[in-house]
Image: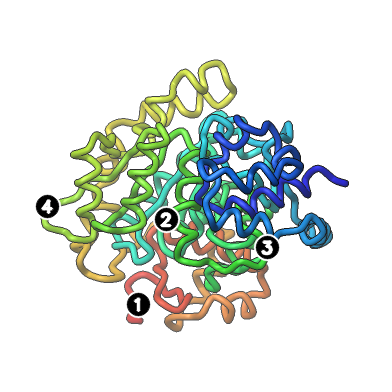
Amino acid sequence: MDNRVHWLWLAQVLGPDARLGPVLEQYGTAQAVYENRKDALSDRTLFSAAMHARMRDTTLEECEERLYAVLSSGYGVLCREDETFPERLKAFDTCPPVLYYMGDTALLDGFLNIGCVGSRRPQALFRNLTLRVCRSLAAAGVTLFSGFAAGIDADVHRAAYSADRGSVAVLPCGIDVAYPAENRGLRRMVVKKGLLLSQFAPGLPAYREHFRPRNRLLCMLCDGVLVSQAALKSGSLMSGHLAMECGAEVFSFPDRIGNPATAGNLQLLREGAVLCTGPQDLVLPFRDRYAGLHEEEQIDRMIETGPGILKDTPDRYVEQLPEPSEKGAEPAHDGAPLPVRLESVYRALEDGPVHIEQLAAKLSMPAGTLMAALTELELLGAVQSLPGKQYVRKGSKP
């Protein structure tokens, strides 16, 4: 029998919030837990009553069927004992026994992994800062991670794709579940160059109790985590605290006092997060990671550009932005010539807002290519996105 079956069995028994470390310290392997389950059923220290129930109810046969179904569907499975399992995860007691994936697992072992999280309804200022910072980091070879929610998370992956780099999406659901539905096109885009990753069995929806384990997994995989925009009692603030618990460096954009949408940013800064003014702030603490690598020269050039995005182009990206409280506001396009490859997309928006699917059909353009073009146009300040997956030229009335 494929030994991965025992790991799927153990993952089912423990659930997403369990501590794998003490279990392996006691038993050694997933197979050993299964073979000694009579003793395990009397162990109330390592296993809860709910775990005991799942231990009695879960069979190897159903786990073997699940493994076959996963592999037959084109997904992959990484188990804790595999050589390719992320080494950095093994240091944590809360390391998942199993990871399901689709894409390039080499991204998990990048020289520098930076996560970025934020609001599902980001204000214009923080969306633009996130797009610019993440695009610069990705272009320099940094691997970007996010939780694949709408809003800031989705922008992280778009920024990486526009820099022709892969990113890692850590999911709160089964690897085969398209969540959120609005990110279906983005999901295809991520898989092309990046990685979809989940600790949850295929078919499981994004239950509320999945988000904390998802956020913790993301933080365990990252050297640093940027919290772009976080309200108090938000999932983004929770991720910042989980990152601190995991020993990752935490970064946050500053904002004015009195903005409830970013009160979590200020709290993290009070608690010791590093103030982020641009991409150089996120790489400086890790200079030893890229010393001598081919990425070093490009990163050093990024560092030498100055005090950061909050100051380096204020006329386009900061001063012309309305107050963040103005929902959906974006910087105006400065009239500079667009790259030729973007002109057809820009012209297609001349009559007002267009849904992304209509735009793709109108241009006969693959969804991933179109998304990358729209992201670049947003970075240039030429277009803005609207609710309902619509896009419009900057300055046009929605």
In which image quadrant can residue 50 be found?
bottom right
Q: Earlier in the sequence, mark 1 or mark 4?
A: 4
SS class of the residue under badge 1? loop
Residue type at mark 2: give it: Leu
Residue type at mark 3: give it: Pro
Q: Earlier in the sequence, mark 3 or mark 4?
A: 3
Residue type at mark 4: give it: Ile
322 vs 395, left or right, is left
Q: CA distance from mark 3 to mark 1?
A: 43 Å
Neighbourhood count class around disc 1 (C-alpha, 10 Å): few under 14, some 14–19, many 20 upward:
few
| Residue linked to disc 3 | 202
Question: Residue at the spot x=31%, y=64% of the render?
Answer: 330
Residue type at mark 1: give it: Ser
**Residue 121, percent from left and from top:** 34, 66
Neighbourhood count class around disc 3 (C-alpha, 10 Å): few under 14, some 14–19, many 20 upward:
some
Question: Residue at the spot x=50%, y=53% of the render?
Answer: 214
Q: CA distance from mark 1 to mark 4?
A: 32 Å
39 vs 225, left or right, is right
| Residue linked to disc 1 | 396
| Residue linked to disc 4 | 257
SS class of the residue under badge 2? helix
Circle nearer the viewer, 2 or 3: 3
Looking at the rendered structure, which numbered label has been put on residue 89?
Answer: none
**Residue 147, percent from left and from top:** 49, 54
81 vs 114, left or right, is right
SS class of the residue under badge 3? loop
| Residue linked to disc 2 | 379
Q: CA distance from mark 4 to mark 2?
A: 27 Å
Q: CA distance from mark 2 to mark 3?
A: 35 Å
Task: Tell me, yes or no, if residue 186 can be seen here.
Answer: yes
Question: Residue at the spot x=59%, y=50% of the render?
Answer: 14
Circle nearer the viewer, 1 or 2: 2
